[in-house]
Image (cartoon, grey):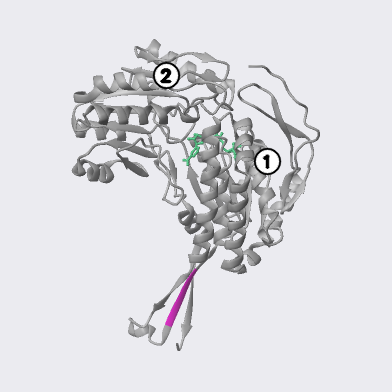
Amino acid sequence: MSAESTEPTAPRSFWLAGRPATGAGSFEVRNPYDGSLVATVSVPTDEQVEQAVAAAHAAVPATTALSAHARASALDHVARRLGERTEEIAQLITAENGKPIKWARGEVGRAVSVFRWAAEEARRFGGEVQRLDTDAAAAGRTAIVRRFPKGAVLGISPFNFPLNLAAHKVAPAIAAGAPILLKPAPATPLAGLLIGELLAETDLPEGSWSILPVPNERMAALTTDPRLPVISFTGSTVVGELIQGQAPHKHVTLELGGNAAAVVLADYSTEDDLDWAANRIATFANYQGGQSCISVQRVIADRAVYDRLAAKIVDAVARQGVGAPTDPATDVGPLINEAAAQRVEQWVNEAVDAGAKLLAGGTREGATYAPTVLAEVPHDAKALCEEIFGPVLVLQVVDGVDEAFAAVNDSKYGLQAGVFTHNLQHAFRAHRELEVGGVVIGDAPSFRADQMPYGGAKASGVGREGVKYAMADYTYERVLVLTGI
Ligand code: NAD
């Protein structure tokens, strides 16, 4: 891995109230795989941040009044342009994030879907007429109920899906008629800024959107500003809780971390069953180096299938292709930086020192951590009870469904769970009892379709994304009572 760099000519601009702008100073975006310089990005000044907030606030009447047709047309345009530029954008994501190119292409496809769904939801976003005269006291009255934006939205997105999770902030805001100020992650600002290029080709109202790479230490100016009454945050639990504390009177949606479990029950026992489960678990523990909030971290297997499953998982993990993210055959690339890989290494070493068995992996080269499988991990080891956010699986053995589901719930997190079973009773029981935002039957927990409600229980978050659910979060019902009608 070399550290060659091509010096970019000038810092990239950000988007201030719909226009490209540069500020004071810049920061570097480096390729996590080889350390090369991908770009430098200009940093907005305090004054520019203030201008963006004022513009977003001032744009609320215009975005609220914007027709469904205009909202949907802008969203369709962005979807179409993302689709046309898929390869270029995927290469950009791979360069700034280190994500293997096949996953980066998939991410662009998902962002296209998010904008398309948002266009459809914008067309559907209606209201209802209510009879109020069911009560004698309300005779002669009728209500029209419509949803209106709570105000401008502050969207804060993480590094691990730099395009699609930015899309999940921007697209529902446009569909709901809310101005949006997006703050992308400092390691991966380029995909978020690229959305600005496409929005700039639309006729969205003046000042209604900004994309600002504001440094973390200056973010309180935004999170506490009353002109941004809605915050939609995706990122770590620690930062999400900090923001929630800073903004007690705001509507704050938090999409936070997890240590998702895949449960394999005793009935899932044929060779084909276990091959499928092992392959899916190995794939979704390691895709993007395990840097997905719903990566499989814990495997909770019934004793009846544990030994055979564990052997198949170790084999499947060994088949994961580790290498250069630009190689289409690569499954596992680097983590976001070397410090992240060192932290994962430290947590694995701590678990092994405390008695865990290392069944695969456990090695690091720069920012790349090898796909790793641990068993017999002590209950309080960070590799088990915290979010590892790396390519590490922890195998646990249980006896029966009660123990399996109790083990899933024995976590401070609760984002999604996967349950490999053919038994409908177990499937419905999982839906009832697992303390998570989503249960996936017959697959790993790492499945997300962008229109479904997505979010966590416990320390994994508050509120739901998924286009129409985010639109509901960004808006509130306002009733119009008509008298004599
Ligand atoms: P992070 O919390 O470090 O950063 C997330 C965003 O918050 C970034 O834009 C960052 O610049 C910003 N930020 C940091 N400090 C801030 C502050 N004091 N005030 C305001 N904003 C601040 O997270 P990350 O490392 O970028 O992303 C990884 C985390 O995101 C993991 O925990 C992962 O599970 C979580 N995640 C959750 C979901 C979900 O939908 N639940 C999806 C993807 C990632």
Q: Is residue 406 visible?
A: yes
User: In the image, is 341 to the left or to the right of 41?
Assistant: left
Q: Residue at x 59, y 69 (%)?
A: 67
Q: Nearer the viewer, residue 232 or 247?
A: 232
Q: Which mark is residue 76?
A: none
Q: Secondary structure at mark 2?
A: strand
Measured from the top left, where is residue 21 in percent x and y?
77, 46
Residue 440 vs residue 47, the one in the foreground: 440
- Counting residues from the N terminus, which is met first, the one under dot 2 or under dot 1? 1
Magenta stretch contains residue 375: no
* Amino acid type of the residue that numbered disc 1 sits on in the rendered structure: Pro
Tell me if residue 84 comes above or below residue 151 in the rendering. above
Q: Quarter holding the N terminus?
A: top right
Residue 456 screen position, x and y as percent: 41, 43
Question: What residue sits right under mark 1 in the picture?
Answer: 213
Q: Magenta region's main secondary structure?
A: strand
Q: On the rendered structure, is 281 left or right of 338?
A: left
Instruction: Identify which amino acid the numbered label 2 is placed on.
Output: Thr
Judge whether 329 appears above or below 433 on screen.
Answer: above
- Extent of the magenta region: 142-146
